[in-house]
């Protein structure tokens, strides 16, 4: 059966999460985790609200997806995230064994790719640039307003 959902559709859902973060004064990063063509977790950055430097969208989404599946491993799942994950999040992605990661905007300063794809699990597939312009614009606009 052919899926009617695309990477762009799921990234749009992550973008909606990023907008929730921006609306509450958080760095606008959103994430969704998809399993069998169904969103099983949604999250956005909450480091300010929770006073927790680890409350990144990816970490919160991984925790929610693991709870949903009742499994620490998220094989057969795809993580869609609006910004390239940091090294901490790449570690969580590695340990959770997420099958595929799709991110929108690159993060040259803090993104894990500065250190290489090897930070992810060897079986994890990586795609980037999906809805890049929208993801970059949300972040850029937020940061310009903060300055």
Image (cartoon, rainbow, N blue to C red):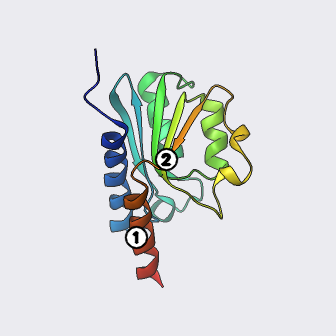
> Of the residues tagged 1 and 2, which is closer to the observer?
2
**114 to the left or right of 127:** right
The residue under the point 37% across, 48% down is 14
Question: Looking at the image, is 119 positioned above or below residue 19?
Answer: above
Of 61 and 78, the residue lying toward us = 78
Q: Which residue in the protein does label 2 denote?
A: 103
Q: Name the residue under label 1.
A: 25
- Taking the spot 46% from the left edge, 56% from the top edge, the residue there is 45
Mark 2 neighbour class, 10 Å CA radius: few under 14, some 14 to 19, many 20 or more: many
Task: Determine the residue located farthest toward the left in the rendered image.
Answer: 4
Q: Nearer the viewer, residue 116 or 19?
A: 116
Which quadrant is home to the N terminus?
top left
Query: Circle 2 — which element?
Result: strand
Q: Most extreme residue toward the bottom, as rendered? A: 147
> Residues under labels 1 and 2: Cα distance?
22 Å
Looking at the image, tell me whether mark 1 or mark 2 is earlier in sequence order.
Answer: 1
Q: At numbered mark 1, what does the secondary structure look like: helix, strand or loop?
A: loop
In the image, residue 21 above or below residue 38: below
Image quadrant in which you'd find residue 118: top right
Residue located 60% across and 28% down the image: 97
Q: In which quarter of the image is residue 144?
A: bottom left
Residue drawn where x is 47% and y is 22% of the image: 70
Instruction: Assess whether mark 2 and mark 1 are in contact (beta carbons under 8 angstroms).
Output: no
């Amino acid at each position: 059966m052919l899926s009617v959902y695309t990477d762009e559709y799921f990234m749009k859902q992550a973008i909606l999460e990023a907008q929730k973060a921006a609306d509450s004064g958080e760095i606008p990063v959103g994430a969704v985790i998809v399993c069998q063509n169904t969103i099983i977790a949604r999250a956005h950055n909450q480091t300010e609200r929770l006073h927790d430097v680890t409350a990144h969208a990816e970490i919160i989404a991984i925790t929610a997806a693991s709870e949903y599946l009742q499994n620490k491993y998220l094989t057969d799942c795809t993580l869609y995230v609006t910004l390239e994950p940091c090294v901490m999040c790449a570690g969580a992605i590695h340990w959770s064994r997420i099958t595929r990661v799709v991110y929108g905007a690159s993060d040259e300063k803090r993104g894990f790719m500065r250190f290489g794809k090897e930070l992810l699990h060897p079986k994890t597939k990586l795609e980037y640039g999906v809805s890049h312009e929208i993801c970059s614009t949300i972040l850029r606009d937020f940061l310009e307003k903060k300055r």
